[in-house]
Image: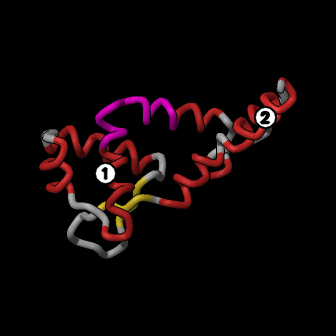
Amino acid sequence: MQKNNRTSLGGGPLLNYARIFRVLGQESRLEVLNLIYLSGEDGIKPKEIIGKLGVDGGTLHFHLDRLRAFNLIVTKAGDPRGIYYPNNSALMELAGFFAPIQAEDKRDIALAA
């Protein structure tokens, strides 16, 4: 397998990917991100997330802070309502992390056949 020289979100080292995956390894945080992602351009308010997931406000804000720290979610400037949106470009870049791995796997499968 070839060594990959990918960089992370924000142009840092590959180690940042590991940090992001560690952050996403917490199940309830991943559920929060999923709800925000599914909200799309409409966004979602913390109160809605609390209602759907049954988490308390303090726990939710802890998760939101961690997701924002890694630029996976955003709020719109000047939006006093506290609506959270997915950062689609960051999430697509994160998903792109796997593209070279998938290509190598497909090539290995084709060679084995």
Location of residue 101 (image quadrant):
top right
Chief secondary structure of the magenta span? Answer: helix
Mark 1 and mark 2 in contact (Cβ < 8 Å)? Answer: no
The residue indicated by pointer 1 is: 35
Which residue type does callout 1 highlight?
Leu
Dot label at residue 18? none
Query: Which residue corresponds to the image point at 52% horizontal and 52% vertical from the top-left?
Result: 91
In the visual, does 88 lie left or right of 52?
right
Instruction: Name the quadrant of the N terminus.
Output: top right
Instruction: Name the quadrant of the C terminus.
Output: top right
Query: Which residue corresponds to the image point at 21% horizontal and 60% vertical from the top-left?
Result: 45
Task: Give the percent coordinates (x, y) of residue 100.
Answer: 74, 41
Task: Give the percent coordinates (x, y) of residue 75.
Answer: 35, 64
The residue indicated by pointer 2 is: 104
Q: CA distance from mark 2 to mark 1?
A: 31 Å
The span shown in magenta is 20-31
Magenta segment: does it hold 51? no
Residue lying farthest to the bottom in this orientation? 78
Task: Give the percent coordinates (x, y) of residue 79.
Answer: 28, 73
Q: Is residue 43 above or below residue 9?
A: below
Task: Give the percent coordinates (x, y) of residue 61.
Answer: 24, 46
Query: Which residue corresponds to the image point at 43% horizontal and 34% vertical from the top-left?
Result: 23
Q: Secondary structure at mark 1?
A: helix
Query: Which residue corresponds to the image point at 20% horizontal and 55% vertical from the top-left?
Result: 46
Which residue type does callout 2 highlight?
Glu
Residue lying farthest to the front in this orientation? 113
